[in-house]
Amino acid sequence: MPGAGFNLKTGDQSSSRLVLIWRILQAIVWLAGAGILFCLLFFPPLGVLLFWNILIPVAPALFVTALGVWRNVCPLATTNLLPRHAGLSKRKRLSVTQLGKLNLIGVIAFYIIVPLRHSIFNTNGVATGILIISMAVIGIVMGFFYEWKSAWCSGLCPVHPVEKLYGGNVLISVPNAHCGKCRNCVIPCPDSTPNIQPNSSAKTIYHRINGLLITGGLPGFIWGWFHVHDERTISSIGDFLGVYEMPLLGFMITLVIYGILIMNIRPKFEQRLTSIFAALGVSCYYWYRIPALFGFGIKGSDGLLLNLRNTLPEWVLAVITVSVCIFFFYWLVVRKQNNKSWSVRPQYSK
Ligand code: SF4
């Protein structure tokens, strides 16, 4: 495979054993992803359970602790980077402004798609499967033209803004299992920049808007999202807008609070403020998601994985949930910034 290989310390292309291990992991996770996609299309209830109630709830915690692992094995990334690995990409470079615009489209797509989970995706495996296939097609097409992760993984992917917000203080840097030699295709490269945050790349107005929307808006958006019921059928514009009301309200509240704070604090505290909003976002997610997974959700059986309502005292789950939230605040806000990037930058291409 052109461009495969790395050394953990130097980024050199030498450790074939490490390459092999990551290729095997990528293959396993890709097959698991393909299996989930198959279930979504042909056994929708099982696919929905596997995708929305197992895979997705694990993702934020992985983003916070070891995002590089996810970036290395994400099945969508493995698919979208196939043209580049196979030497079929034109390897074009995006300008900083183009990247900022792609990021902005990604943020907006995130805020548009996620509320639709309540009306379509959470209960419709086929629709979720089509959504995933659509993203894969767009990513592959971009992969034929643009260098490494620039266009999709660090550009248009709607999940990437959340990665950037949550992945500001990861535990480990892993080898970059996709990029062979670094072509500096994203500046700053989110994979290779220590303690990257949404505002680290405030190079253009688009980058600044991205940082504002995802950092300020996400905690409230998540809070509002959990106050909407699943299985709303959209039969009118009113129904359609209905799934956006609460997420939008929450989004506006925390965005305004963040906007006021960021204008009034000293620049040296900006990173800390971003960390606080990241912790608020991920904690709010698990505050509602953990009880919902086990039958204690505020919206009945929405998002249910395993109903323990009649077997587990409610206080046990409350203790677990509070502990998880405290952990994220410690991890993102209290813990010292450790100068680690999601992955080790490979050697620069000459
Ligand atoms: S490591 Fe280098 S080649 Fe890979 S995405 Fe980052 S900047 Fe691009």
Image: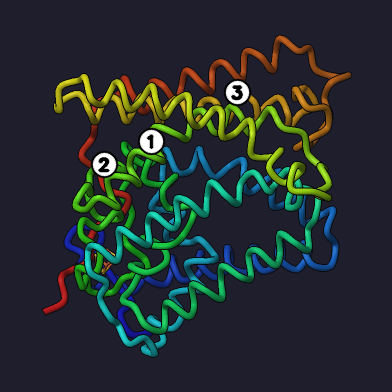
Extreme-top residue of the structure: 315
* Vertical side of 134 occupied by 102: above or below: above
Q: Secondary structure at mark 3?
A: helix
Asked where in the image residue 155 lies, by quadrant, the reply is bottom left
The kind of residue tagged 3 is Trp
Extreme-right residue of the structure: 310
Circles 2, 3 touching at the beta carbon (< 8 Å): no
Q: CA distance from mark 2 to mark 3?
A: 26 Å
* Vertical side of 155 occupied by 134: above or below: below
Residue of label 1: 215
Residue 137 — which label?
Answer: none
Residue 287 — which label?
Answer: 3
* Vertical side of 105 occupied by 151: above or below: below
Counting residues from the start of the chain, the first of labels 2 and 3 encountered is 2
Residue 320 in percent (x, y) is at: 62, 19
Circles 1, 2 touching at the beta carbon (< 8 Å): yes
Counting residues from the start of the chain, the first of labels 1 and 2 encountered is 2
